[in-house]
Amino acid sequence: MESVKEKTTTVPISLTNGALDQLNLIRQQEDIPAEYGLRVGVKGGGCSGFSYILGFDAPDENDDIFEISGIKVIMNKAHAIYLIGMEVDFINGLDNRGFTFNNPNATSTCGCGTSFSA
């Protein structure tokens, strides 16, 4: 009998309960296809150099796929260096409502909270 090697991949980011609740609500309200996952990434631009990508999308060949509390998370392999250890939260307050990013890799952030430099 052959032994099967399992590949264990560490989940690079975390999602708070608030983020999970909001993402599940969005998936249901927007009727997101089951094969889509939550794309988390970065792109050039924003006031500090990079801005975050967060949205449902289909995976492609350059993506790693993870599961966090029942949500499939997809991330371009090249983006992991900027995102490892990041926490995504959802704030629903009187003064602020939306997703927030707590990224230990960011050397500076801007006031909008969605742009950073590394």
Image (cartoon, rainbow, N blue to C red):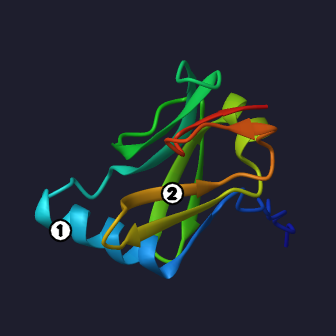
Mark 2 packing: few (<14 Cα in 10 Å), some, or many (20+)?
some
- Asked whether 6 or 26 is in front, the reply is 26
Q: Position of residue 109 (x, y in %)?
A: 67, 39
Residue 54 pos. (x, y %): 43, 45
Q: Position of residue 29 (x, y in %)?
A: 12, 65
Please give the name of the residue rendered at 70% of the width and 62% of the height, measured from the top-left corner: 11
Q: Quadrant of residue 7?
A: bottom right
Q: Nearer the viewer, residue 60 or 100?
A: 100
Residue labelled with disc 1? 28
Distance (Cα) linking label 1 and label 2: 21 Å
Q: Residue placed at 58% from the left, 54% from the top?
A: 101
Question: The residue tagged with tag 2: helix, strand or loop?
Answer: strand
- Number of labels in the image equals 2
Q: Which mark is residue 52?
A: none
Quarter of the image with the N terminus is: bottom right
Farthest residue toward the front?
95
Q: Earlier in the sequence, mark 1 or mark 2?
A: 1
The residue to which callout 2 is attached is: 100
Residue 108 falls in image quadrant: top right
Of 10 and 91, the residue lying toward us = 91
